[in-house]
Amino acid sequence: MDNDNKKTKVLIIDDDVNMMEMLSIMLKKYNCDVLMYTEPVSAIEKMKSDKCDILLINYFMSPVNGDRIVKLVREFDKEIYIILMSSHTELNPSIELMKKLDIQAYFEKSSRFDELIMLIQGGINYLEQLEKIKKIALKLDHSLIDFAKVLLNTIGAKDHYTEEHSERVSKFAEKFGEYLGLENKEIETLRTAGLFHDIGKIGITDSILLKEGKLTYEEYEIIKSHPVIGANIFETSSLFKELAPIILSHHERIDGNGYPNKLKGKEIPFLAKVLTLCDCFDAIVSKRPYKEEQTVEFGLDQIKQGINTQFDKELSNKFIKFVKSNRRMIDEILKI
C-alpha cells in the first residue's frame, strides 16, 4: 500500500471504540494515517477542513446511521473512497443504496481483516487512477483555454475593439469581484469569463461584426447569437464549464427583455449579473466605430438609469460606489 511513501489518510467513524483501535493498529502497518471518531459531527467537520482519502464507516450506529452520514459527506466530497462496515450480516445495505450514495465497498466485520486490507488497497488504486484522469483532463482543459485564446486573437486581428474591450471587462470584473468580497475562485471565474465573454463573435461574419452603420433587424438577430456560440465552446470543459452560463447570460436583463433566453431577476446567474455591469459600463464609455468616447460620469449615469430594468439594483449601487472610490484604477483600466 506504499505509494512513493505517501501515507493514505483513513478516517474511521464507528461507535465501537475497540473495533476502531484494532483497525487503527492494523492500518498503520500499511502506511496509513488513521483518524478515529465516535461522533459523526466532529468527523464531518474534520473532513471539511482536512481532506481524507478513505472513509471507513459503520452502517448501524446510534443515534445516526452511517448511510445518513455518507449522504452529508457526499455533499462536499465527491471523491473520497467510502467503505461501509457492518456486523449485522442479515441487514446488508442494498445495491441501490450503495449506488445512490456512491459507496465503493462493503465489509462485514465478521470477515477476515485481510479482506478489508484488499478493499483499502482497491481504494488506493482507485484514487491513483482518479488522479491520473484529473491530470489528463487538466491538460485537455488548458488546451481548450489555449484554443479559446487563439480564437480571441483571431477576432482581435479583425476587430481590435472586441479584443481590447474583453481585456478591460476582464480587469473590471476581477476588481469588482474583489470589491464585493467574493471568494478567490469566483473572482478567477469572473476574470476568465470577462476575457472570453464575447468569444462567440468568432461565429459572426465580418460584414456584420465590423459594420459601422446601424444593424438591420436580421443582422442584430445574428449578433444576438454570440452568447450561445461562446457558451457552447466551454460547455464541454470539466474545469471551465462554470464559464458557460455566465457567458450565455451576460446580455440578459433584470426585466426579462434580454437575450438569448429572456431570463429575469433571480433566474440570471449572480456572476452573469456582475459581468453584465462591467461589460455595459465599458461599452458605454469606450470609443466605438459608431460613437465617441464618453466620460465615466456619463457611464455611471447610464448604469443608474438602467437599475431595475437592465441591471440588478443592489449590484448597480455597489458598482457605482466601486467606480467612484477607485477612480484612478478605473482610468488606468480604460487606457487598455
Image: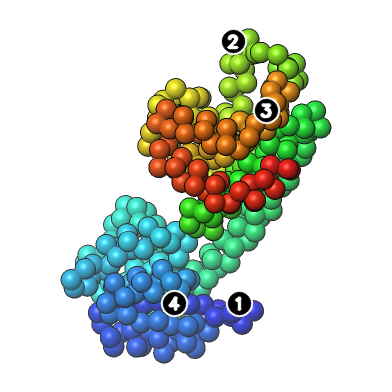
Q: Which residue is mark 1?
A: 3
The residue pinned by badge 3 equals: 201
- Name which of mark 2 and mark 4 comes first in the sequence: 4
Which disc, if any, is residue 10?
A: 4
Q: Could you tell me residue 105's position as x and y percent?
A: 40, 65
- Secondary structure at badge 1 equals loop
Cα separation, mark 1 vs mark 4, equals: 14 Å
User: What separation in Å lies between label 2 and label 4 (alpha carbons)?
Assistant: 63 Å
Between tags 1 and 2, which lies in front? Answer: 2
Mark 2 lies on residue: 217
Name which quarter of the figure residue 200 lies in: top right
For label 3, count other residues whose C-alpha is less than 10 Å away and answer few (under 14), some (14-19) or many (20+).
many
Q: Earlier in the sequence, mark 3 or mark 1?
A: 1
Q: Quadrant of the N terminus?
A: bottom right
Residue displayed at 65% across by 51% down: 328
Structural crowding at the residue carrying mark 2, measured as other residues with C-alpha within 10 Å and reported as few (<14), some (14–19) or many (≥20): few
Near-viewer residue (245 or 91): 245
Q: Which mark is residue 101?
A: none
